[in-house]
Amino acid sequence: MADAHAQHATETQQVTEIMFTAEFWDERYGSTDRVWSGNPNPHLVTTVAGLAPGDALDVGSGEGADAVWLAGQGWRVTGVDVSQVALGRAAAHAAERGGQLAERITWQQVDVLSWDPAPARYDLVSAQFMHLPRPALEALHRRLAAAVRPGGTLLIVGHHPSDLETTIGRPRLPELMFTAEQVAATLDERAWEIRAETPGREVTGPDGLPVTIHDAVLTAVRRR
């Protein structure tokens, strides 16, 4: 049993070391015309509905759907991603929407495993479905929290571990999944108003049948 556990840990480490490189994501984005839907993430749309536009940080911006949508709502956006291929595609997407919108977005290639955003710089920090090994993820979440201004909002969304019990086909890497409560544990309750939720949504499984999956959604507002 111990040998099996050690082998699984080694395999997980090998997979994650590959998955979080620029080369991996450049190849994935470069292998197809579009990886994602092009629509903004619904939890972002819901959260932003009650906020006044300001400075936003979109972490893991991919092909730019969230950043472009935020800019369309009047936000000044910094979109960061490890893949230069994705960022080029995102910039083209923004340019298609018109110069004024594109001018509200700055694209930046970063390695989130080591990158540290400016402290207290943003009114909104959003990280949608960023899955990293637990120590690296917790460290990233703390750095993202530090980047939020007083009165600003931190929004972190991920796949809930319960999805592994469905047929939806998540990668069999439970170490990369997290709950909203685990994210909340990295924050000081004295400094934040915290809401941790696990909303469900219905999707179509690989067999064509409906499947209910769950997201881990952490919304936190830094106290003034």
Image (spheres, helix red, strand yellow):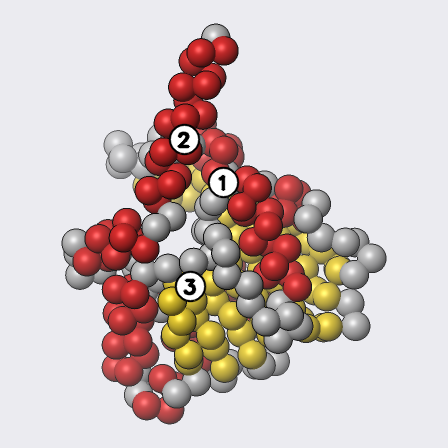
Say which label, 2 or 3, has the lower sequence index. Answer: 2
Q: CA distance from mark 3 to mark 1?
A: 18 Å
How many numbered discs, if any? 3
Q: In the rendered image, which residue does mark 1 sit on? A: 133
Q: Secondary structure at mark 1?
A: loop
Three-letter residue code for mark 1:
Pro
Q: Secondary structure at mark 2?
A: helix
The mark found on residue 110 in the picture is 3
Q: CA distance from mark 1 to mark 2?
A: 9 Å
Is residue 5 in sight in this rendering?
Answer: yes
Estimate the x, y position of residue 60 in percent, counting from the top left: 42, 60
Q: In the rendered image, which residue does mark 2 sit on? A: 12
Q: Nearer the viewer, residue 161 or 55?
A: 55
Three-letter residue code for mark 3:
Val
Three-letter residue code for mark 2:
Thr
Q: Is residue 48 above or below residue 82?
A: below
In the orientation shown, which residue stands out farthest toward the bottom? 100
Identity of the residue drawn at 27% across and 71% down:
88
